[in-house]
């Protein structure tokens, strides 16, 4: 899909990857760009910096997503590209993660994507064109050492995007799923852990790959090209791949124990 002249929504758009996406769409001459975020302060600052429209919601709330769609209908006449980018790292670990912690990350990292697709796609299907871009993570493809909630929810987000592409891709709906490793954002300000094994890229690099994917209707967006190699290794010999990840897990545990004892 050509980005020029399109009406675009970016959730989680006030910082990090979302902010870089909004900037990229503006540079590509999108007709209307709306940044969406839960942070009122970040929205206000980014709105001024990028000179675009802004809208505050919690993506985990279905009624707020519905209100967002109505807002875009009123302001721009509809939505051509919806980037469901909002997400959180959540509480790491497994045994220490409470039921409430699980529900919170699930609602934001998965249900937010579901609400968006459910309420944005009808208008796209009616006119026979539209594009959904869901941000997941390389963790959704490869798992996340040290964090069960993040790994599980990102895998679910990837699975949803894949299902949407299979089901509606022949009906005019483009779908891409962003699966980077470590990206320079507020979420990685204190370090990226094992996600940074192949280095940390800028949010702008990540956004550029998304724009390219949308133009080419490419489903999987992997700014870290090493991820593609890891997927091939995983699919060709799952047990060997798990053994390798177990070794990485051991290194993570050793580093964590050494850090906490110092």
Image (cartoon, rainbow, N blue to C red):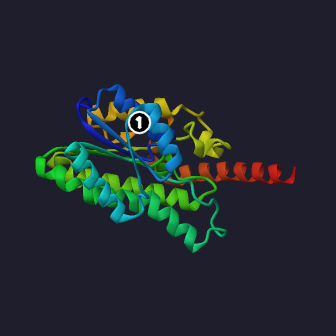
Residue 129 image point, x, y percent: 17, 44
Residue 67 image point, x, y percent: 30, 58
Q: Which residue is drawn at 64% across and 41% down?
A: 189
Q: Residue at x 68, y 44 (%)?
A: 190
Residue 122 image point, x, y percent: 18, 56
Residue 1 image point, x, y percent: 23, 34
> Number of labelled discs?
1
Q: Nearer the viewer, residue 237 or 78?
A: 78
Question: Which quadrant of the figure has residue 175?
Answer: top left
Label 1: state its secondary structure.
helix
Question: Which quadrant of the figure has residue 117?
Answer: bottom left
Classify 10 Å Cα crowding around label 1: few (below 14), some (14-19), many (20 and above). many
98 lies above or below 257: below
Q: Is 2 displayed left or right of 62 in the figure?
A: left
Furthest residue to the left? 127
Q: Which of 30 and 114 is in front in this view?
A: 30
- Read off the residue under disc 1: 21
Q: Is 6 displayed left or right of 26 in the figure?
A: left
Q: Can residue 162 be seen in this view?
A: yes
Q: Which residue is drawn at 36% across and 61% down?
A: 64
Furthest residue to the right? 262
Q: Is residue 230 visible?
A: no
């Amino acid at each position: 899909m050509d980005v020029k002249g399109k009406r675009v929504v970016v959730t989680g758009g006030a910082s990090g990857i979302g902010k870089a996406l909004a900037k990229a769409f503006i540079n590509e001459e999108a007709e209307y760009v709306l940044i969406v975020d839960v942070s009122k302060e970040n929205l206000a600052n980014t709105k001024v910096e990028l000179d675009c429209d802004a809208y505050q919601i919690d993506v985990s709330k279905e009624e707020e997503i519905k209100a967002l769609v109505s807002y875009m209908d009123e302001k721009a006449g509809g939505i051509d590209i919806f980037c469901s980018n909002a997400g959180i790292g959540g509480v790491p670990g497994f045994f220490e993660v409470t039921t409430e912690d699980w529900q919170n990350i699930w609602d934001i990292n998965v249900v937010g994507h579901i609400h968006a697709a459910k309420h944005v796609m009808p208008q796209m299907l009616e006119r026979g064109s539209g594009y959904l871009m869901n941000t997941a993570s390389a963790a959704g493809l490869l798992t996340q050492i040290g964090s069960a909630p993040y790994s599980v929810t990102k895998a679910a987000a990837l699975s949803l995007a894949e299902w949407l592409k299979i089901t509606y891709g022949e009906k005019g709906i483009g779908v891409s799923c962003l699966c980077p490793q470590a990206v320079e954002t507020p979420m990685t300000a204190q370090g990226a852990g094992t996600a940074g094994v192949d280095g940390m890229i800028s949010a702008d690099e990540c956004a550029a790959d998304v724009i390219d994917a949308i133009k080419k209707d490419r489903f999987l967006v992997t700014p870290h090209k090493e991820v593609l190699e890891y997927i091939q290794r995983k699919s060709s010999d799952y047990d060997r791949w798990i053994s390798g990840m177990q070794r990485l897990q051991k290194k993570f545990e050793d580093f964590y124990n050494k850090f906490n004892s110092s």
